[in-house]
Image (cartoon, rainbow, N blue to C red):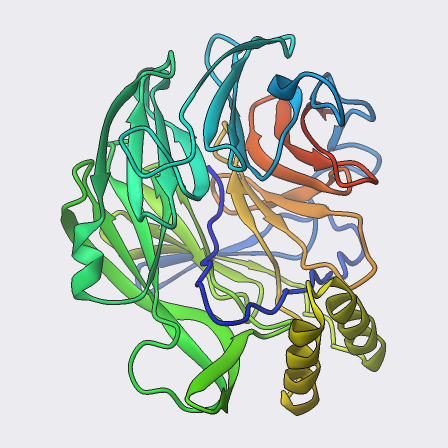
Amino acid sequence: MTTRSIRPELILLLTLAPVACDTGPASHSGPEVRDSAGVQIVESSGPQWPDGGGWRLAESPTLDIGVDEGDEKYQFFQVAGALELSDGRIIVANGGTGELRFYDASGNFHSSTGRQGNGPGEFQDILWIERLAADSIIVYDYRLRRISVFDSLGRFVRTFDLYFIDQIGGFPTLVAPFPDGSLLVALEQSFVGEREPGLRRDSTLYFRCDMEGALLDTLGRYPGAESYSIQQGDGWLGGGVPFGHVSQATVHGAGYYYGSSDSYEIGYHAADGTLQRIIRLNRSSLEVTAEDIELFTQQSLASARDERRRQIRQRIYARMPWPDVMPAYAEFKTDAEGNLWVSEYLRPGDEQPRWTVFDPHGTMLGVVETPPHLQISQIGSGFVLGRWRDELGVEHVRMYELLKE
């Protein structure tokens, strides 16, 4: 399963810079495990993998689908996810065309379904795809707030809405399905209710709903993403805070992980929201330096789509209070064996992704480096699959062998 972060459609979205944490010296002592009021606490100080051992990705991909020019079936734009099915086929959600494309295990195009639109089996903004039982596919369209279900051959089955969201208000994100077919839904409450200018941290509500979109349970209210806004005339300008804390969540088994990124602490909750385990890593968050702020600002202003947006960002950065420390981590993902992968939050200019891996019981195993510019969609027992961009920004879907030594 993959982690989901909230993507509110604000007037201006400020790009969040990745940040890194110091992994510290290797330590092979086991974690400290204790019980506190019925909640298990697992605290690690270092990796369990031996020096020179552990897991790593092969240097070259075993599968590479994607071209700059040529057959359109192999050209990608805004890939929202990629999955390997049980028979070895690869399904790619190509958001730019609103298609689900199927390739064989060698990367040869087989078929496609879907297109841009509002009708059944059509999409406006594919946020993610996941596998269900018997290789059926569930697709979440963020703009339409709609879930579509397809069978293993790509045939449209049905669609449903998260209709209970309208009664609450906020920006919904479908996190992942539970094994029983129910769905974990996060509802970001940014800018809901009275607005005040300045720095704020709104909450995220977590729900469980069924495969018809009906609410089954309210799991809890947690800290959400930090944001900053200023008032301009009758409107508001703002968005996510650079180096700001952002909540993360992903499903594992019959429960889910949640972390606020304030410190290196991650909770594992049962499907009803009950906290069962706390995972801690003895690692301090990095300080935000003047060099970090300068490089981030340069990169953000240079990436603005037009002069108006550049000026807005410049105005906000000049007034915004910058965080003192970086988040403790970035994304969460779980692999096919139930291990939790937690990515470091990289400093501006650091392009080497690093993932800290915890076993299903919360013990830190070690750190895995993944290729720069690879956005991971799926981690199998022996592979990592995701979207990769080359130096020209051309999108590919790549699979790397996961070597375990």
Identity of the residue drawn at 79% across and 48% down:
352
Which residue is at the front of the view, 58 or 255?
Answer: 58
Is residue 325 among what the camera can see? Answer: no
Position of residue 305 measured from the top left corner of the image (x, y, whole percent): 68, 63
When asked about the image quadrant of residue 139, the answer is: top left
Q: Is 85 placed left or right of 203 in the picture?
A: right
When asked about the image quadrant of residue 147, the answer is: top left
Which residue is at the front of the view, 70 or 129?
Answer: 70
Which residue is at the front of the view, 81 or 22?
Answer: 81
Position of residue 390 measured from the top left corner of the image (x, y, whole percent): 79, 36
Position of residue 265 measured from the top left corner of the image (x, y, whole percent): 52, 62
Is residue 180 among what the camera can see? Answer: yes
Identity of the residue drawn at 44% across and 40% down:
126
- Decide: is 245 above or below 99: below
Identity of the residue drawn at 38% across and 48% down:
142
Position of residue 72 measured from the top left corner of the image (x, y, whole percent): 63, 21
Q: Quadrant of the C terminus?
A: top right
